[in-house]
Amino acid sequence: MARSNIWEHGTDAPVPAVAVLDDRGDVVGWSRAAGDLLGYPAAEILGRPGTDLRMERDRATRIWTWSGGHGDDDYRIGMVDLRHRDGDQIVTHLERIRITTPGGAPAWVVAAIPASVFTLGTSVLEPLLSAAPIVMVVWDIDLRSVWRNEQAQRLEGFFPCFEVGRPLPEAQGEADPLVPPELIREVLADGVPVLDRESRWGGADRERTFSTFLFRVEALDSRPLGVCLMAIDITHSRARERLALLRRASVQIGTTLDVQRTAQELTDLAVPAFADYATVDLTEAVMPGTEPLERLEANQNGIPVFRRAGLASIHDGVPEALWPLGQPVYVPPGSPFTKVLASGRSYFEPEMDTSPGSWLDDDPHRARVIAAMGMHTLIIVPLWARGSLLGIAVFVRTDTKAQFTRDDLVLAEELAARAALSLDNARQYTREHDASLALQRQLLPRRLCGGDVMELASRYLPSDVHQGVGGDWYDTIPLPGSRLALVVGDVTGHGINAAASMGRLRTAMRTLAYLGLPPAELLARLDELYARQDEEEQGSALSPIAATCLYAVYDPAARRCTLASAGHLPPAIVDPGGGVSFVDPPAGTPIGLGLGVHESVEFELGEGSLMALYTDGLVERRDDDLDEGMRRLGAALARTEGPLDGLCTSVIDAMVTRTAEDDVTLLLARTLASS
């Protein structure tokens, strides 16, 4: 039989109301405290069924609640609604013990204390719950506070509703608990608990964070009796801090496709949240545009294995660093750094061994810095991504006295894994971008040839937004009869494929131009050729999609210009007086659709006139319409004095005032006087 502590009271504990029920459930014993609590004198209640004292109005329900619910239990404790003699409801904390009479028949001793004065002093758990390092508050069915432990009592000045007897506020305000009152009411109504809800309290200078739990307190028959709040202070929880650091890593590492920027983001995140000093050193293959490490000679510091890409410290000037950003990092062959590089596994030294005979004997410069800065705990993590070892991340503590733990090693490896993926993305992007740019610049004309017909100048500005460069191109083609063809175009897409497609288009256009085809016919033939090639190379990586272009032929003898457009923007014409107009030829279809619908337009281009051919990257902006971009271009072209090269620069400066959202191409041609 379970042992009860219902009679273990201090001097201030309430006297329980005690009754005895026989095996049929009739009241056979009745204490004075029971009479005081429920209003029945002993003469009036003895012999009556104990179920008459329950609050349920239906007798069958009361009987089932007693016998079917828990009538055969040896011991039961919980919150129960009892009926006062005048019909009022009394919420009680009730304990019931099964006993055996001298005749061998079962009976029950029942003791009850009103919940409104219940202090848990009747329970063996009371000392534990009262002194527990968590906040606990209980509200009754009317959402009045009926109990709170010592931790909650300390917060009563900030949360008055924790005070015993105080009702829950109707709406959210200064007197609220750690969770909205509406949520507490929902839990009381539907019984669905709230688990691990993060709640914040306090100002910016002393904000505290709690993990809160809400659950409904129920009677033995599962009827709601109130709500209990439990709150754990997790403001300085190491687990929470680790999760917060990982969440920050997901948004702060890899914000750009730049290798060194990504490496620096890792060290900036780690210091001071995780380490006092951190570095990221990368292998030669990851660092673009640097001198190969194999060509560097070894010295007394070891051999050059890495190049420094990230560096952060809690100390101004980073006195811990032997090598600044961008410089080769030398390490002895037997050092932990080379071991991590060779094995691909992390190195963990919770307490650094600086005694004679350690690896520092072969690295006196590091040994000197370690001693001077008080480095005492070390983690070195390899940076793996997609099967490639990109380098290492090093974490050290100096001023922070706590040593790194195994949990810290797991966190460091998680941070390194996330950073390594971003580094690899940046490396692949940089590699393709450099290759695309090199390919495109090889395919673009190295020197513009206008002869004694036209003065020429050009600019090409690759985008910093899209992956790789695009398919913009321009060209000038000398033709028989001193004529000169001017070309500008834009292949859809970006990267190596767009650059390669642009090269093929430029070659095909030059071939057709040498045949002497007029502009409209040339574009129609180019469209047919391009579409046929697309069909033949269906599925090829270099298969083009579409391209827009403008083809113009200037005849200096007649001072006439003939041009046709394949879906391209109209050229700007600037007369010698500075007036700007746009020649808008019939809109032709882009190259590659196989439609071949193009028409030419002819106009006069007098001596000293300027023609500007460009791609959409020069005039289109996300927040401006095209008409506004062309208006700005006209204003920039109106200043025609001086050499064309200077005008080219001023136009680009005026039109591209921030990071280019698309490739920018500009070709300027000014007619010269007849010789």
Image: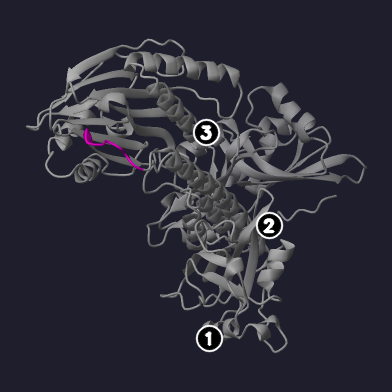
The residue carrying mark 2 is: 125
State left or right for residue 94 relative to residue 147. right
Name the front one of labels 2 and 1: 1
Q: CA distance from mark 2 to mark 3?
A: 73 Å
The residue carrying mark 3 is: 497
Name the front one of labels 3 and 1: 3
Q: Residue at x 52, y 33 (%)?
A: 497
Range covered by the magenta-colored residues: 447-454
State left or right for residue 6 relative to residue 412. right
- Judging depth in this view, the residue of 117 and 154 nearest the camera is 154
> Quadrant location of residue 668?
top left
Answer with mark 2 or mark 1, whichever residue precedes in sequence: 2
* Dot 2 amino acid type: Leu
Label 3: element kind: helix
Q: Main secondary structure of the magenta part?
A: loop
Which class describes the residues within 10 Å of circle 2: few (<14), some (14-19), or many (20+)? few
Q: Residue at x 50, y 75 (%)?
A: 321
Q: Is residue 316 above or below residue 56?
A: below
Q: CA distance from mark 2 to mark 1?
A: 54 Å
Numbered mark located on residue 171 in the image: none
